[in-house]
Amino acid sequence: MSHAARLLGFAFANADLLLEVAKDGAIVFATGAAREFSATDELAGTGLAQLFDGESGLTLLTKLRALPSGGRDGPLSLKLASGNEVGVALCRLPQNGEHISCTMTRPGSARAQRGVTIDAATGLRTANAFLESIGQGMAPGETLSLIDIPALTRSGSREKADGLLAAVARAVKSVGARTVGRVGETSFGAVGPDGGAKRHLAAVVRKMLHDTHMDAPGITEALVSMSGQGLSAEQRMLAVRYCVGRFTAGHHGGKPGDDLAEIFRTMMAETQARAEALTETVAKSAFDFAYQPIVNLKSGALAHCEALVRFHSGSGAGETVGFAEALGISEPFDLAVAAKVIREVEKTPDTRVAFNLSARTIGDPMTFGLISGLLAQKRAMRSRVLIEVTETAQLTDLAKANAAIQSLREIGFQVGIDDFGAGAASLQYLHAMLVDFVKFDGGLVARIGASRREDKLLEGLVSLCSELGVETVAECLETEAQTTRAREMGFTLGQGHYFGKAMPEIAKNAPEQRVAKRKGVQVSWS
């Protein structure tokens, strides 16, 4: 395989600069945004360490020389010669001889922005950082104050808009709350005792604008007490975070002029009721599965099925699982799913089934310990039960996640990553975690054939997985043309309506089972 082809996989992982270097640090291949990292576009033939300051360059050379065949390192946070921070990841493929593949991510890129905690325009906490601070706990008597100032997006000239935003930011900072943040384009929040009735955030902003001779635009405010409402203290914090996120994203159903405080209180009450109902559902395992086939693309044989959760309430599984994670219910839910899947597979001979385990559960020692203990007791099922780690909640501590995954693989269970390739962390996951398979995001697979460039990038990442010994699954295959192209790209397994919809009963993996799709034939799984 050519160097360029191997690096296609890295490009697909949203890296900004793609390199291959020799162990002595000489760059032998480069493509991407070179100008973001150096003064020249021509990097091939130069030394990689020259792009960095002295200490970072020495660190990188040491890493390069120590990297064994098949080894990975990073992401590393290093400093460029310009003084800017940059993310660097390394991988030495056995088939690539002495050459080492390297990716670099520029400051300010989508991947780098994941760790940003301060909003550049206001100096306040970003929405994620503000919500994180809420989740860290609030003292008795504290109040959450949310304000919305729609006029910020329609205040005339850029200069006027910037001046108004700066004045609002100064006012929010002056409140003296424990934590303040910009939680939306026109929304701001504060948490603390000073956010209560004696000193509303909205009143402080209006006064600041008045004192600086600016017109005070329409400001709406919602005040939420942190006590009562029937949830535990921890769940209440999670409920507040969930509602603030939906509120600032505009998912509250309100209209201009509506009482935001009443809308927020209603959201909190509905969230509480839903959390209590879902907790009862989990406790009683009051959900079912529908099983969708996953097929070997070369032979047409059924490889296994995926167990998809179906709730008796009829609510969508994906959104409900997201809600469960937001409210801290996902861990017991995952445990209930694992136990029920094993029971179903045990009583259905000649079947293989994959179930989902959330990233949040992987990171929770207590619940993961219970699940791994359950699986250890069911070692006899290790060839018939597979585990897909989902990233509804982002994997953050990759070393910890990898340790958890390896403990399951050591028992004998196959473990993979779901929705692979959807975000900027794809390459980072391959570096940090040893898995048996990856399931490519359906949105990527659905676009097969629409763009030659995208197809090449996707094919490169599939090839990279193959070289690393990682099996690949293409989900959301809907047509014969997509399926044929996926097979040509090197995908080993396929899933989607082309092979059959999810059905209430598990399809059996009899040796003679074949999945053939022909015109006029209805494929069912029962």
Image (cartoon, rainbow, N blue to C red):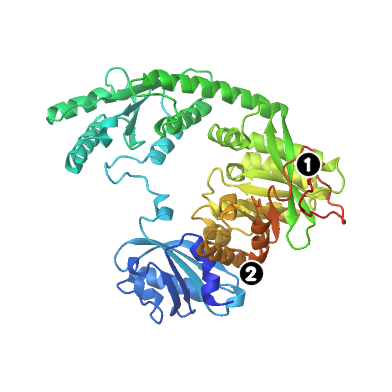
The residue tagged with tag 2: helix, strand or loop?
Answer: helix
- Quarter of the image with the N terminus in it: bottom right
292, 381: nearer the viewer: 292
Left or right, 211 with respect to 303, comes to left
Seen in the picture, residue 99 relative to 490 is either above or below; the reply is below
- Quarter of the image with the C terminus in it: top right
Seen in the picture, residue 469 relative to 386 is either above or below; the reply is below
Task: From the image, tell me which residue sits under label 1.
Answer: 342
Task: From the image, tell me which residue sits under label 2.
Answer: 467
146, 451: nearer the viewer: 451
Mark linked to residue 85: none
Residue 190 lies in what quarter of the image? top left
Q: CA distance from mark 2 to mark 1?
A: 32 Å
Amino acid found under the numbered disc labelled 2: Glu
**Please, which residue is most extreme toward the bottom here?**
45
Residue 364 lies in what quarter of the image? top right
